[in-house]
Image (cartoon, rainbow, N blue to C red):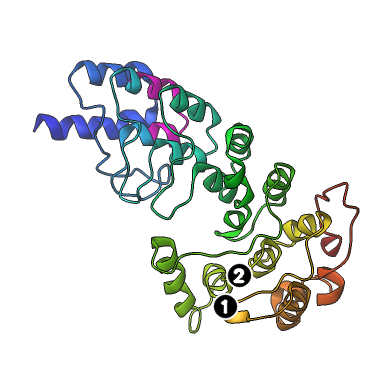
Amino acid sequence: MESALLCCRWDMQVLGGSPLLVAALLEARANPNDRLKRVEGQLLPSISGMTVLQACVYLHHNEAMKVLLVFKADADATDTNGAASMHWAASSNNSEAVRILMEAGCSPMRPVRTGHVPLEIAAATNSFDVLRELIPIAPREVIAKSLPAVFFFGGGSADAVSMLIEAQADVNLQMSVPKRSLFGLILSFFSIRHRWSKSTLSAFAYHHCGATPLMLSLITSSFEAAAVLLAAGVREDVETWGSDSNVGQRRWCNAFMMRQKGSKKLKSGYVSATGFCWQRTPSNRFPKKSPALQ
């Protein structure tokens, strides 16, 4: 009964974020590694197994977070999706929490179950402050393969793409995901689903094999990001494989845009396939808006 009452109080105090009240609960022998039993309103995502520390990180209650760490909260504990506090900091753009967690000994390069590291999560969720924190310390190979993550949730950010390109991300990288990995199984599921229930995620999954960042930007309608990639000088001779076998990147992009000509997106004012895909911009600058959108 006492444990249930403390958990209920955790739910209320974590949402309030008061470090004094959090300390009072811990002094009353509340468990710093408790998991929230319920989610109030829209403040927290509906992820089961979220720890009190992860909730504080996500809500930017950094002083309360420090109190929990003093009381030996496990910063490496994971929720049911395999995400630890560092991943929650990355997804919520909490750069201060990233620094605090690194000082507590947490690795900024630990992957979740899908294989994505905090830098990729930050890129996918437009967490620019966290990107600025992680890019200088990320291994070169992590940065090199980070661009596809920008487009996983659709609407990839041109700013995130620019930051990663400036950090030497590979603009011609072709996606290759092991089919038996968790991420591979997720993509396989949505790829099959794409045949009868199309969405941005299903389109990403269906075309991902061998796709370059430019291809992914078009698939997810991230046209400003596509303009940034074109300005960076993507190769035209990259060939796809998988469902779009042996098709050069230029031909694939033009064909894809031609297939979309009747869609609402192109009716809204995006220019023709050839004109958009290969309209060059000076390579020494990254435009904030595609010429196709002006």
Residue 174 seen: yes
Q: Does 285 lie within the magenta span?
A: no
Q: Which mark is residue 242?
A: 1
The amino acid sitting under disc 1 is: Gly
Residue 46 horizontal/vertical position (percent): 36, 50
Residue 18 horizontal/vertical position (percent): 38, 21
Q: In the rendered image, which quarter is residue 16 located in?
A: top left
Q: Which mark is residue 254?
A: none
At 60% from the left and 70% from the top, the residue drawn is 210
Is the C-beta separation of discs 1 and 2 under 8 Å? yes
Residue 272 seen: no
Q: Which mark is residue 210?
A: 2
> Could you say which is closer to the camera, residue 182 or residue 220?
182
The amino acid sitting under disc 2 is: Gly
In the picture shown, does residue 193 fall above or below 146? below
> Could you say which is closer to the camera, residue 241 or residue 155?
241
In the picture shown, does residue 248 fall above or below 288? below
Q: Quadrant of the N terminus?
A: top left
20 vs 232, left or right, is left
The magenta segment: 55-67
Say what secondary structure mark 1 lies in. helix
Residue 183 horizontal/vertical position (percent): 43, 62
